[in-house]
Amino acid sequence: MARSQDTFTKREREKQRVKKQEDKREKMKERKANGKSKSLDDMMAYLDENGNLTNKPPDPRKVKIFRQEDMQISVPKSEDRLPDLPRNGTVSFFNTQKGFGFIIDAETRERIFVHVNDLSAPIQENDKVTFLIQNGPKGLLATDVTHVK
């Protein structure tokens, strides 16, 4: 008699494959018999007023209405400013080696960056100065800085 060509592992794999198919058929029959398919309402997810997912629809009394005109999708445009008038301030810090410093505006008490290229004369800390303000890439810049005696 001839020996079977199947090895032990081949037979085991075949048994597992057949068992898996039978389990799959049984599950399918069970689903058909029970008829418990989820309805659309069971599958729906809602957002509550705080932005959390829930399975209950939101309360119509808590719904907020937003007008399309009030929504801004892009960066808001900068408002047109009046022409800059010379401002007064005090130099709070200036590094002559690196060529930059900060001026404190006398009116608004804001720290404004100043670069050595925008100076008309050399300045030091605690000097009184007049200057114009411009918007720079990282904030306000002082330009046309002049020393006041």
Image (cartoon, rainbow, N blue to C red):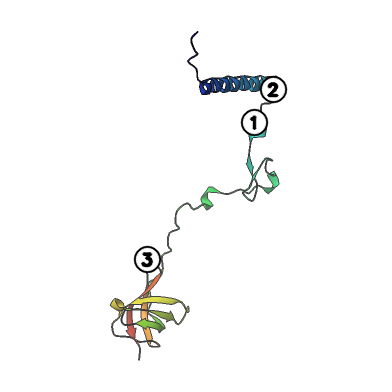
Residue denoted by label 3? 137
Image-quadrant location for residue 128? bottom left
> Pointer 3: residues within 10 angstroms few (<14), some, or many (20+)?
few
Q: Is residue 44 above or below residue 132?
A: above
Looking at the image, residue 93 sits to the left or right of residue 8; the answer is: left
- Marker disc for residue 35: 2
Q: Nearer the viewer, mark 3 or mark 1?
A: 1
Q: Do tag 1 and tag 2 residues touch (Cβ < 8 Å)?
A: no
Say which of marks 1 and 2 sits in front: 2
Q: Residue at x 64, y 51 (%)?
A: 50
Instruction: Say which residue appears at 66% left-offset and 19% top-offset.
Output: 29
| Quadrant of the image occupied by residue 137 | bottom left
Tell whether 7 sits left or right of 57: left
Instruction: Please provide percent x and percent y for residue 92.
Output: 42, 83
- The type of residue carrying mark 1 is Leu
Circle 1 SS class = helix
> Quick one: 38 or 63, which is closer to the camera?
38
Question: Counting residues from the N terminus, which is met first, the one under dot 2 or under dot 3?
Answer: 2
Q: Residues within 10 Å of mark 2 (few under 14, many from 20)?
A: few
Q: Quadrant of residue 143?
A: bottom left
Q: Measured along the vertical axis of the image, is residue 95 above or below residue 3?
A: below
Residue type at mark 2: give it.
Answer: Gly
Towards the viewer: 24 or 132: 24
> Mark 2, mark 3: which one is toward the viewer?
2
Q: What residue is disc 1 on?
A: 40
Under mark 3, the amino acid is Pro
Q: Secondary structure at mark 2?
A: loop
Determine the CA span between mark 3 and mark 1.
52 Å
